[in-house]
Image (cartoon, rainbow, N blue to C red):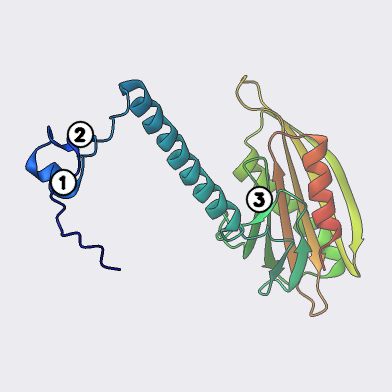
């Protein structure tokens, strides 16, 4: 509805008389926003930094938890060349290359114990023990180097249908660096008339390592 007023208004009353022309055209100037105190700015920056750090930590945690799992430890080893499979107790891992020439599979428990297996020569059942004695002497000189070596076991065995013979040694040392060591050599027969050589070493010689090695030996198939 036209009330006869014109724009811009020509008369706003006395209060507008002291305002500049622009104020009379566009209204009273608005005061600029107040700046935050220095302490408030510092606090705001700190809060933002904490929130950012928290977000980064959250992303990292989610990335770790959501990442691929480590490959599970090998629970058994299959040695195709020797024709056997044997279990590994918890804490054991299959190796890639045996440290002794001729062995076709290897498994270790850190640097505490090792088992190595290889195919052996054809040996008559009656000659298993004499052949084993030679192997035990060879590996004892190669691996133990003990100042005192005692035979702790020497007997015929049967493992999952495989007949054989086993011999175990305990070595002690005069120096204060080397702890007692344990070595076992086992010769098992195969259905084809051949043999399988199983060599285990534990250093130091302790009941837990012996139990692991016995478990592996008992599971050879």
Residue 63 in sight from this viewpoint:
yes
Element type where label 3 sits in the image: strand
x 56%, y 58%: residue: 67
Q: Which residue is mark 1?
A: 11
For the C terminus, give its image quadrant. bottom right
SS class, disc 2: helix
Q: Percent position (x, y) of residue 141?
A: 63, 42
Q: How far across and how far down the image is residue 156, in percent?
A: 91, 56
**Vertical placement of 42 versus 211: above or below?**
above
Disc marking residue 108: 3
- Whether pointer 1 and pointer 2 mark residues with C-beta atoms closer than 8 Å, the reply is no
Q: Nearer the viewer, mark 3 or mark 2?
A: 2
Instruction: Place residue 35 in its image quadrant.
Output: top left
Q: Is residue 49 left or right of residue 166?
A: left
Give the alpha-carbon distance from disc 1 to disc 2, as whole Å. 10 Å
Which residue corresponds to mark 2?
15
Task: Residue 195 in the image: state x and y as whole percent.
Answer: 76, 69
Q: Residue at x 80, y 47 (%)?
A: 212
Q: Residue at x 41, y 37 (%)?
A: 48
The vertical placement of 119 against 201, above or below, is below
Is 77 on the left-hand or right-hand side of 129?
left
């Amino acid at each position: 509805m036209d009330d006869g007023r014109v724009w811009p208004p020509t008369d706003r009353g006395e209060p507008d008389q002291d305002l500049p022309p622009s104020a009379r055209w566009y209204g009273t100037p608005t005061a600029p926003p107040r700046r935050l105190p220095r302490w408030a700015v510092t606090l705001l920056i700190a809060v933002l930094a904490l929130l950012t750090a928290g977000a980064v930590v959250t992303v990292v945690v989610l990335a770790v938890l959501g990442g691929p799992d480590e490959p599970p430890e090998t629970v058994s080893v299959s040695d195709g060349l020797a024709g056997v499979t044997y279990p590994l107790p918890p804490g054991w891992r299959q190796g890639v290359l045996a440290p002794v020439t001729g062995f076709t599979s290897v498994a270790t428990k850190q640097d505490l114990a090792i088992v190595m297996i290889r195919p052996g020569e054809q040996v008559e059942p009656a000659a298993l023990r004499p052949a084993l004695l030679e192997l035990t002497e060879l590996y004892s000189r190669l691996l133990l180097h003990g100042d005192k070596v005692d035979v702790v076991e020497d007997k015929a065995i049967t493992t999952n249908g495989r007949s054989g013979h086993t011999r175990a040694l305990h070595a002690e040392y005069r120096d204060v660096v080397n702890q007692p060591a344990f070595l076992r050599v086992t010769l098992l027969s195969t259905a084809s008339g051949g043999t399988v050589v199983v060599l285990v070493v534990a250093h130091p010689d302790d009941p837990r390592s012996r139990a692991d090695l016995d478990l592996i030996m008992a599971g050879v198939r």
